[in-house]
Structure formats: C-alpha cells, structure tokens
C-alpha cells in the first residue's frame, strides 16, 4: 500500500498514520481515528517521560506535524521505553517544510501531559522505530521511482527533436534503461524488507540487515533515478506545471527521512566489521 501511495505521490500522512498505529498497537494502546504522526524521527534523538507524567524534549523534522491530530511518541521512562499518545494541539509546533513542500516541523514536548501512556514495552526502542520508518520510506521511494520511469518513457515517446521522438536516440534509450534498472533494484529491495518484517518476531540482526540494505539501495536509486528523469525531460521537468517534480522532490526528501543512506551504510559497516569475515556469508544468506 505504501508503494502504491508513493507511485501516486499522495500528499497526506498515510505512512505516518500507519507507523503511529503500529507503534500504538505494539504498546497495547487503542489506535484513534484520524491523521497521526510519530516522534522522534531522527537517528540519535530521544524523548523522556518524567515521574510527574509529563514529557520533555524536542523532536525535529516531524512529518505532517501541523496537520496531524495526534502524535504517537516513543519515550524513555527511566530504563524502560513507553509509548504515549499526545494531542498535537498541546505541543509547540514550529514551521518548516521538506523539499516537496510538505511540513517537517520541530515539535516541542516540554511539559506536555499525554492522553494515554503504555506500560513498558519489551523489544521496542528508538532504533526499532527508525527501522520501521526507513522500511516505510523505502516502499514509498520504490513506488515513486516506478512512477517517474513510466512518466519518462511516455515523454520520450512524445517529445520530438530532429524530426523523431527522443526515445529513438540511443543515448536516451540507454538512460531510460538505467532508470529501469534502478527502479527494479529499488522495488526488489523494498519488497524484501517488507517480507522480512512481515515474518519477523523481533528486530534482530537479520531485520537490521534488510532494513539497512533497503534504505541504502533505494536511496541510491532515488538519487540516480531522479537525475536521469530530469535529464530526459530537460527544463520542463522542473516547472511547477509539470508532474515530474511532484515525485522527484519527494524522492529527495524521503531518502533523508529516518536516516540517509550514508547513516545506514556506516551502521551496516560497523555491524559487519564487528561480526567478522567468517560471518558475512551466513549473515547475507540466512533464510
């Protein structure tokens, strides 16, 4: 479903609402109706729930914070992790936007009293939330890449230069083939991590490997694919009137959400190095 939403560049917090619902249900809380978002969404950030029942901390770049009715918050309470449901109106929401002109806001939670707080949740922490978010963005980017491939192929059939469609030129055909390859790789990586998460009982090393590999590979495909698509379209692809930029600006934004490919590449490299050379093949070949 997220891949299809990316294929249509849906400008609503669908992924964020699904992630919030997953977080709340994982903690045993009732999932409310309406649009939601989650916090924190940046690697290394954490929020705290104090003994007085109030939250403290600031979450940056929270997607759709100005539109969501509720925010599902993962917070630390002592040594434990809990999930809290917060009314967005009770928070301090700053202004900000992504490259696609979608809200990415700084949300202040100091002194906010949640509407509901879960008991401590085993196996759920900031890293698990980052992994789910990265997987969701990978699916959306794969869908958007499929869309720009279809748009670029059709444009190459219609755009005439030197008395023939530009799709007849070998250089253009070569670039579109590269775009097709990047799209296929992205769809495969996103599908693989989706299957793995659907069958996993916990966020173990195998899940981390799939998430990191997907976010890295799909992010690289997004950068390469968006460039090829704009090269095929020329200047018209950047204009407000043309549909292409609706997808490419989201691709550029999504590749940074929940950790860019460089962030995940460093973490993946550290895990591989820590396990040693003898563990590389068993790790990538596990069923």
Image (cartoon, helix red, strand yellow):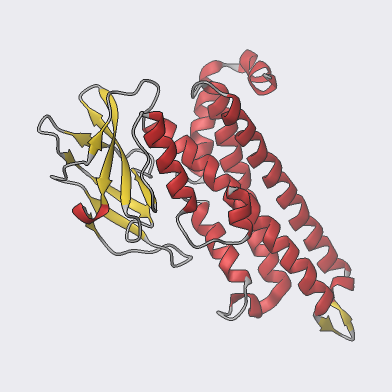
- 170 displayed left or right of 123: right
Viewer-nearest residue: 176 or 122: 122
Residue drawn at 53 percent across, 22 percent down = 205
Q: Residue furthest top?
A: 278
Q: Residue 24 in the image: state x and y as whole percent.
A: 37, 36
Is the residue 90 above or below the residue 200 in the image?
below
Q: Does residue 222 appear in this view?
A: no
- 193 displayed left or right of 46: right
Q: Residue 282 in the image: state x and y as whole percent.
A: 67, 16
Q: Quadrant of the C terminus?
A: top right
Q: Residue 72 in the image: state x and y as whole percent.
A: 33, 42
Residue drawn at 40 percent across, 42 percent down = 20
Is the residue 210 above or below the residue 251 in the image?
above
Is the residue 129 above or below the residue 124 in the image?
below
Residue drawn at 81 percent across, 68 percent down = 172
Viewer-nearest residue: 233 or 204: 204
Q: Quadrant of residue 171?
A: bottom right
Q: Give the tally of numbered discs.
A: 0
């Amino acid at each position: 479903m997220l891949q299809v939403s990316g294929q249509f560049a849906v400008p609503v917090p669908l992924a964020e609402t699904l992630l919030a619902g997953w977080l709340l249900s994982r903690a045993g809380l009732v999932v409310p109706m309406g649009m939601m978002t989650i916090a924190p969404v940046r690697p290394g950030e954490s929020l705290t729930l104090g003994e007085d029942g109030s939250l403290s901390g600031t979450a940056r770049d929270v997607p759709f914070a100005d539109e969501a009715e509720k925010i599902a918050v993962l917070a630390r309470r002592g040594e434990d992790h809990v999930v809290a449901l917060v009314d967005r109106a009770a928070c301090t929401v700053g202004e900000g936007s992504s490259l696609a002109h979608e809200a990415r806001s700084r949300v202040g939670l100091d002194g906010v009293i949640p509407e509901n707080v879960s008991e401590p949740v085993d196996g759920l922490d900031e890293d698990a939330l980052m992994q789910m978010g990265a997987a969701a963005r990978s699916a959306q980017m794969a869908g958007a890449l499929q869309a720009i491939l279809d748009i670029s192929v059709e444009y190459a059939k219609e755009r005439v230069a030197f008395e023939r469609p530009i799709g007849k030129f070998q250089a253009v055909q070569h670039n579109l083939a590269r775009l097709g390859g990047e799209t296929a790789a992205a769809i495969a990586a996103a599908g693989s991590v989706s299957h793995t998460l659907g069958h996993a009982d916990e966020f173990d090393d195998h899940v981390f490997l799939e998430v990191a590999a997907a976010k890295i590979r799909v992010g690289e495909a997004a950068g390469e694919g968006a460039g090829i698509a704009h090269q095929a379209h020329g200047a018209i692809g950047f204009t407000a009137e043309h549909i292409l930029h609706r997808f490419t600006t989201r691709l550029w934004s999504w590749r940074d959400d929940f950790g860019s490919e460089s962030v995940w590449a460093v973490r993946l490299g550290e895990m591989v190095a820590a396990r040693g050379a003898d563990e590389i093949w068993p790790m990538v070949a596990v069923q």
